[in-house]
Amino acid sequence: MWVGPCNDSDDRLVALSRQLPQDRLLTAREARACGLRPEDLRALVRAGLLCHPMRSVYRPATLEDTLPLRIAALRRVVPQDCVVTDRSAAWLWGAASALAPNDHLSVPRISVFAPPGRRLRNGLTSSGERILADRDVAEQEGLQVTTPLRTVCDLARLLHRDQALAAMDSLSALGAFSNTRLCAELDRFRGYRGIRQARTLAPMTDPRSGSFGESVMRLRWMDAGLPRPECQVEIPAPNGSFYLLDMGLPDERFGGEYDGEEFHGPEQAEHDEHRRSWARDHESWTLVVARKVNVFGRGQDVERRLREAYERHRSR
């Protein structure tokens, strides 16, 4: 049960909150410039009219808590010798698929690493120590951030293999490095945790992957022992243009599609069925269509389905 601050009426607290800007973060110094004392800020936080995500930074309760907003908060207080790393760095560079599954449902902590001997301690960051070379760091949106190449090396080593390949695909799509460059860069991490996984995944990385789910389905495809597929395979369409298949072997006319919930809802079903029927009936393709339940979790069966479908296709 909330107990209001002593000697502060609701009307006075609302009036105090209106003295502050409602469309952005502000620091304690900026709040003082608006006429609020430290005890006023504490009262507003207790009343739920102001949020205090980290030391010296405040957010109006009416302002939605988002990842860009947390980055803006860090920009105000993170020391210059600290570096944003891992998924957070990938997101800052524009690789959205590098975020963890369901991170869009709750705002994740931001990975920020300090030089050896220090770590940040606040409610917004996941911090630790990491040794970085000068060439591993660049400035992005006013923060020191690991470069796309260093970021992909770290994520390839440290994430679960499903999430790692999806992040690698997404970072690769930025065009900042090639698979050859990535494989060569991994040599400097010999003996590091997860380097064997990173070396296995690096040659599979493909910038044409269309989504997190497509990346993971492609990994299941490789696990099934099938030849490496191409992403975004073009097939002729009846109107003279072309359709795209998520992945496939063009010479053998065998492909796979991942129907994620975001892009393949009921409104898309008719178009998907028309496109796939054309591929099967007029272009002689064999297609394996998978949904989330087929690719993720204990009941996943797409690896078996791909292998069996490919064997039947080859036998014909």
Image (spheres, rainbow, N blue to C red):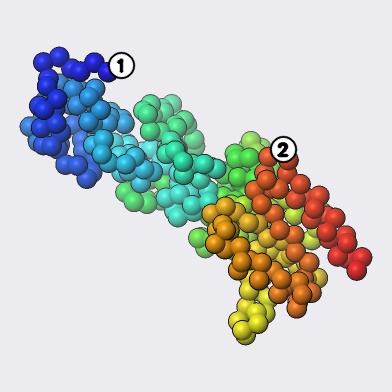
Name the image quarter holding residue 280: bottom right
Report the front residue among 87 and 310: 310
Q: Residue at x 38, y 33 (%)?
A: 124
Looking at the image, which residue is at 76% across and 47% down?
301
Residue at 83% across / 60% down in the picture?
Answer: 310
In this view of the protein, can residue 231 be seen by the observer? no
Identify the element where label 2 is drawn: loop
Give the camera-side residue of 134 and 124.
124
Residue 308 left/right relative to 14:
right
Kindly give the residue lying farthest to the right in the view shown. Answer: 315
Q: Which mark is residue 298?
A: 2
Residue kind at label 2, given as amino acid type: Arg
Which residue is pictured at 22% across the width and 24% down the height?
A: 47
> For the C terminus, which image quadrant?
bottom right
Nearest-to-viewer mark from 1 and 2: 1
Identify residue type, mark 1.
Met
Q: Which mark is residue 1?
A: 1
Residue 303's place in the image compared with 247, above or below, is above
Question: In the displayed structure, would residue 232 be above or below residue 142?
Answer: below
Residue 268 at x, y percent in the picture: 57, 63
Residue 42: percent from left, percent from top: 20, 23
Left or right side of 161 for 314:
right
Helix, strand, or loop for circle 1? loop
Badge number at residue 225: none
Query: In front here: 172 or 305?
Result: 305
